[in-house]
Amino acid sequence: MQKIVYFVRHGQSEGNVSPIFQPLESPLTGLGREQAAIAAKRLGKISFQALISSPLPRTKETAEIVSRATGVAAEYSDLFVERKKPTGVIGKSLDNPEASKVWREWEESLFISGKKVEDGENFDEIAARAEAALLFLRQRPEKTIVVVTHGFFLRTLIAKVILADSFSQANHRNIQTRATMDNTGISAIKYSRTFDDEHWRLWIYNDRTHLG
C-alpha cells in the first residue's frame, strides 16, 4: 500500500507582512492570491481525491482557489491549523514590549515539555496534534491527498516524519530554526506498508519552482 500527501503552505497573508502578531482572521494579500493561483495550476497536474485545509481564512482562501482550479471540493480540519498563539498577543504590534515578552516566553514553550504560557499551544500539545494529524491522514481511504496548512505546523509534521522515535524538544527546535518554508511551497510525504514495515517518508520539501 502507498499513500501520498502533498502539503501546501498558504499564500502570503496580510499578517505575514504586517508589523503585528498575526490575527487568526488574517486574509491573503493580492500577491498571496496570485501565489495560490499559480500553485493551484501546478496541483491541477496531479490526480488527487481529497483536498483538506486548515479553516483559518488564509488557508481557506488558498484552498478555495485550489478547489476552483482542480474541481476537488475542500474540506476543513482543525488538526491542520497553525500553532496556537496566546490570545493576548494577537493583533498587537511587534514593538509592544509586554506582547513581545509573552511571545518570546511562548516560543520557548514550543520546545520545552511541560511549559505553558497563557492559552498558547506548547510543545506537548503541538507534538500530539501532529501525531494525530498523521494518523488521520493514514486512516483516510484516499491514495492521494492535498493539505493546505501553515509553515510552523507543517515543519512540525515533517519533523515527526523524518525524526520518528528520535523526535525531541531539541530536534524540533533545530528543524524549526534551520528549515525554511515559503508561501505556497509544496512538500510531500509517502506512506508505505509492506508485510514487515510501514511508515511515512519525506519525499519533497518546500518545492517552489512554480513561483519561478
Image: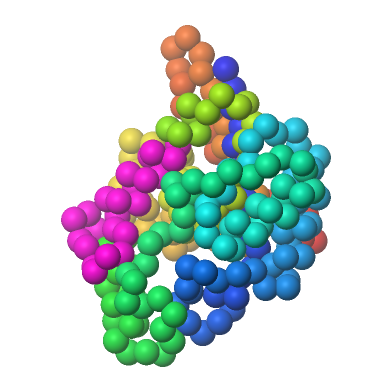
Q: How are the residues colored? A: rainbow
Can see residue 105?
A: yes
Residue 75 sits in quarter: top right
Left or right of 121 in this view: 200: right
Q: Is residue 128 above or below residue 165?
A: below
Q: Residue furthest top?
A: 195
Can you give x and y, in whole percent of width and height, for residue 69 in the image? 79, 48
Residue 50 sits in quarter: top right
Residue at (37, 67) in percent of width and height: 85
Position of the N terminus by quadrant: top right
| Nearer the observer, 111 or 144 | 144
| Nearer the observer, 91 or 101 | 91
| Nearer the observer, 25 or 154 | 25
Can you give x and y, in whole percent of width and height, for residue 166 in the image? 33, 40
Left or right of 65 in this view: 54: left
Can you give x and y, in whole percent of width and height, for residue 100 in the image? 34, 82
Residue span colored magenta:
112-134
Left or right of 42 in this view: 60: left
Q: Residue furthest left?
A: 114
**Magenta highlight on residue 131:** yes
**Magenta highlight on residue 68:** no
Residue 57 sits in quarter: bottom right
Q: How many marks?
A: 0
Left or right of 26 in this view: 131: left
Can see residue 111?
A: no
Residue at (34, 72) in percent of width and height: 87
Residue at (52, 52) in percent of width and height: 54
Can you give x and y, in whole percent of width and height, for residue 77 in the image? 49, 46
